[in-house]
Amino acid sequence: MERVRGAGAVLAVLVVLGAPPAAGEELSGVFQRMVKSECHFINGTEWVRYMERHIHNREQFVHSDSDVGIHVGDTLYGEIQARYWNSQQVYLEYKWAQVDNYCRHNYKVFTPSSVEIRARTCSDFMGQV
């Protein structure tokens, strides 16, 4: 118990004196965790590919592709995550349902307006020529 108190006291003194952390290296304290989902449409909605990338501090550690059907680890930690996620059958079924629930759904939501905008823009240019 005395060791813990002693270590705490030393730490408090170092903080008060402004000792730099990690042997003089500045630590930013900024960590980024990002999941990027992508939908690739080939020939409308006939062939839809759902991809998901997991990124930590600008390094992709695991990715998945609906055409492949499993998660693939890009780093050692990513391999561990991929192995775990691939062992969860319910989770995999949910992920691959994203082709319909996320990609095809959003294609139907956004395509009419984008086609309308594209058609209007083309007709505007045609009138000026």
Image (cartoon, rainbow, N blue to C red):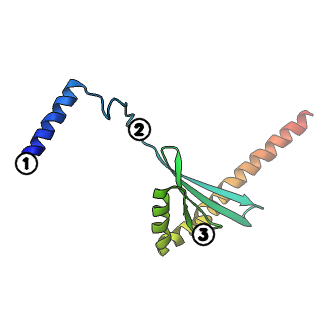
- Please name the amino acid that badge 3 sits on: Gly
Mark 3 lies on residue: 69
State the image coordinates of residue 14 (x, y, percent, origin top left). Answer: 20, 30
State the image coordinates of residue 95 (x, y, percent, origin top left). Answer: 54, 66
- Please name the amino acid that badge 2 sits on: Val
Residue at x-position 48% and y-position 67%: 83
SS label for mark 1:
loop
Viewer-nearest of discs 1 and 3: 1
Q: Which mark is residue 91?
A: none
Mark 1 lies on residue: 1
Q: How far apart in space, not on screen, are marks 2 and 3 (Cα)? A: 33 Å
Q: How far apart in space, not on screen, are marks 2 and 1 (Cα)? A: 33 Å
Q: How far apart in space, not on screen, are marks 1 and 3 (Cα)? A: 53 Å
Picture quadrant of residue 123: top right
SS label for mark 3:
loop
Query: If the image is split into quadrants, where does the C terminus sit?
Result: top right
Q: How dense is the environment of label 2, judged by Cα within 10 Å: few (below 14), some, or many (20 and up)? A: few
State the image coordinates of residue 101 (x, y, percent, origin top left). Answer: 58, 65
Pointer 2 or 1: first along the chain: 1
State the image coordinates of residue 91 (x, y, percent, origin top left). Answer: 48, 70
Give the camera-side residue of 52 and 58. 58
Relative to residue 128, is residue 71 depicted above or below?
A: below
Give the residue at the far top of this rendering: 17
Q: Are marks 2 and 1 in contact (CB under 8 Å)?
A: no
Q: How dense is the environment of label 1, judged by Cα within 10 Å: few (below 14), some, or many (20 and up)? A: few
Give the total number of marks visible in the rendering. 3
Viewer-nearest of discs 2 and 1: 1
Residue at x-position 15% and y-position 39%: 8
- Please name the amino acid that badge 1 sits on: Met
